[in-house]
Image: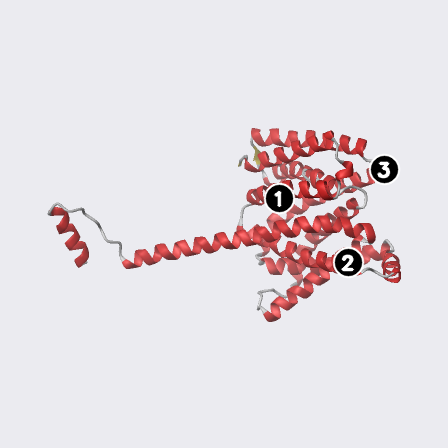
Amino acid sequence: KRARVSRRRGSRDGGPRVDAKPDDAIARDGGRRAAVAMAVVTITLVAAAFCLSGSALTVLNKQIMGFFPAPNAVLFAQNAVTLVLLAFGKSVLSLQIEPVRRHKAKRWFALVLLFYAMLASSMLALKFVTATTLIVQRNLGTVTIAIADYFCLGTVQTKPRILAILGMCVGSLVYASGDLDAASNFDFTGYAWLAVNVAATTAYQIKVKSLVNELDMNSWTMAYYNNLLSLPVCAIVGFAQRENETLQKFMASGATKSQCVALFVSCTLGFCLSVSAFQLNRLITPTSITILNNTNKFALIFFTAYFMDYSTLSESTVAGAAIVMICAAHYSFAGTKK
């Protein structure tokens, strides 16, 4: 108080008038800055984990399908390892994971079926198409999600977004025509599984928006529910498709050290992707997640095309991929209106 009085008197004497900031206001400003800085660091780390694990898992799953074509067995292993890591985190790191509750499990199981369909169709598509094709064509999910948003959630798209959606459709057709010409053993089965993947992804994104807020579970609990309830689905479908015989042949032939490492790393990446995806849904908006996804896909397409899928590159596929990704980025930055 004395400092304020002396400074005001000084201003009357011709000196500059300066109001001293109270100590409690300075403390509040410092606390706010620290909280903002911590939030930025947290979002950056989670986003980096999401991008790196998603990109690496897509590339690695393509390699695994080459020497072990049993998608349900791979998904079962990835889900099981995720559960083990979550249990370890709960006991050692005191992670807050809710026990399974019947009423929540019933509500969540529909989402689990969509989650399984999304992952399994992606794995099955990778048996027939390149990783680059999977990445490009999955952007059609943005189109179907926009349509579902309109009919289910009442989201009206702006004109820039509608133009971007049409551009993505054109780019996907250009890429598919180029892929048809470039691939000597083109199989429409891969594109059929891609269509299933787009449909499952659309339904999953619409369903998860409502359940995440309705059931009020943290990201660790959601990952726990997803992976635990997926295990019986993977096992039943895997046995129905006789993947146990594929597993026996794989073990009898003697898996190499590099193949075992690839399987283990894919399981670890599955854990990182599962947890970081749910955490991002709580930290940032869906539009921000879309921007993050599309930015990440530019680097992933370049990596897979240059190091893995260069044999299928052509002018049409490059042009189609460029159109899709540019339109997807434009869609991300264009706003929506209710």
Colour scheme: secondary structure
Give coordinates of residue 66: x percent, y percent: 81, 50
Within-10-Å neighbours for mark 1: few <14, some 14–19, many 20+: some
The residue depicted at 63 percent of the width and 32 percent of the height is: 165
Real-space CA distance between mark 1 and mark 3, rounded to the nearest whole angstrom: 29 Å
Mark 3 secondary-structure assignment? loop
**Residue at label 2?**
258
Q: Which amino acid is tagged 2?
A: Ser
**Residue at label 1?**
296
Mark 2 secondary-structure assignment? helix
Residue 106 in sight in this render? no
Real-space CA distance between mark 2 and mark 1, rounded to the nearest whole angstrom: 27 Å
* Viewer-proximal residue among 158 and 189: 189
Query: Could you tell which of marks 3 and 2 lies nearer the N-terminus?
Result: 3
Mark 1 secondary-structure assignment? helix
Give coordinates of residue 245: x percent, y percent: 88, 58
Which residue is outermost to the left? Answer: 13
* Image disc number at residue 185: 3
Say above or below: 96 vs 308: below
Q: Which amino acid is tagged 1?
A: Asn
The residue depicted at 55 percent of the width and 54 percent of the height is: 45
The residue depicted at 75 percent of the width and 41 percent of the height is: 309
Q: Which amino acid is tagged 3?
A: Asn
Query: Could you tell which of marks 1 and 3 lies nearer the N-terminus?
Result: 3
State the image quarter where residue 314 is shown. Answer: top right
The residue depicted at 86 percent of the width and 53 percent of the height is: 241
Residue 8 in sight in this render? yes
Left or right, 285 with respect to 17, comes to: right
Cβ atoms at labels 1 and 3 below 8 Å apart: no
